[in-house]
Image (cartoon, rainbow, N blue to C red):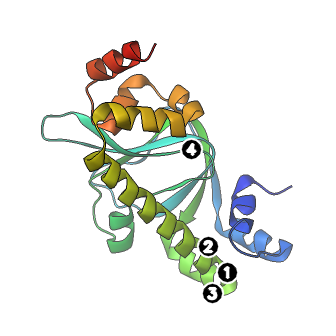
Amino acid sequence: MYPNLIAHIRKQVSLSNEEADIVLKYMKHVKVGKKDFLLKEGQICKANYFVEKGCLRLFFINEKGVEQITQFAIENWWMADYMSLDKQQPSQFYIQAIEASEVFVMDHLLQEELIKEVPAIERYFRLNMQRVYAAMQMRLKFWYDMSKEENYRFFTDLFPGFAQRIPQYMMASYLGFTPEYLSELRKKSK
């Protein structure tokens, strides 16, 4: 039986069993403990991470020393610091497991080799990047168009199970709130 990764790829591109086996040869399966880091600020991002099981977060620490979460990744989502990965320059972000997780690691140096062996993978990664970019565009639109309360309601309505998985202070950070403000919003909605 193939892991979620292969099912995810097959939802977007055609992949034979032989090609699926090749893809898995290029991937490293890693178990990550809760609060373990896959990347720290100052390190160079060397891989793209597919969440097979668990939850990751991408964040930076602002000038006031406060963590600011910019992205989450749950099952079937990819995560990397794409600027650091692409330019092989030190990262300004951290990638950390929020809960015990299992990830597939796609080393950036091996990705080109994989694409040569399984050309459909290039289309798969392109489609994923388009979706990530579109999601970031919509997040920015919501940031400007919606009130903080509307943003909170939209997020919890869109991802109800996920909103229950992450600590409230992390949700507040992601939405640009203080934990106290999020607590007020939650009280209002009861």
Q: Residue at x 50, y 61 (%)?
A: 48
Q: Secondary structure at mark 4?
A: loop
Mark 3 lies on a secondary structure that is: helix
Return the x and y of residue 26 as percentages of the image width and height: 65, 69
- Which residue, given by chain and number where applicable, does mark 2 sit on? 124
For disc 4, the marked residue is 74
Is residue 124 or residue 34 the one in the foreground?
124
Mark 2 or 3: the one toward you: 2
What is the spatial separation of the Cα atoms under label 3 and label 1, in whole angstroms? Answer: 9 Å
Amino acid found under the numbered disc labelled 4: Ile
Q: Amino acid at mark 2?
A: Tyr
Specify whether 91 is left or right of 9.
left
Residue sitting nearer the eye, 146 or 71: 146
- What label sits on residue 116 in the rendered view? 3
* Residue contact at pointers 4 and 3, CB within 8 angstroms: no
* Kind of element beneath mark 2: helix
For the point 32% across and 73% down, the residue is: 87
Q: CA distance from mark 2 to mark 3?
A: 13 Å
Task: Indicate the quadrant where residue 80 lies.
Answer: bottom left
Indicate which label's residue lies in the foreground, 4 or 3. 4
Comes first in the chain, label 4 or label 3: 4
Q: Earlier in the sequence, mark 2 or mark 3?
A: 3
Residue visible at 44% across and 38% down in the picture:
154
- Sort mark 3 into few (<14), some (14-19) or many (20+) by Cα contacts within 10 Å: few
4 and 2 marks in contact (CB < 8 Å): no
Element carrying mark 1: helix
Disc on res. 120 = 1
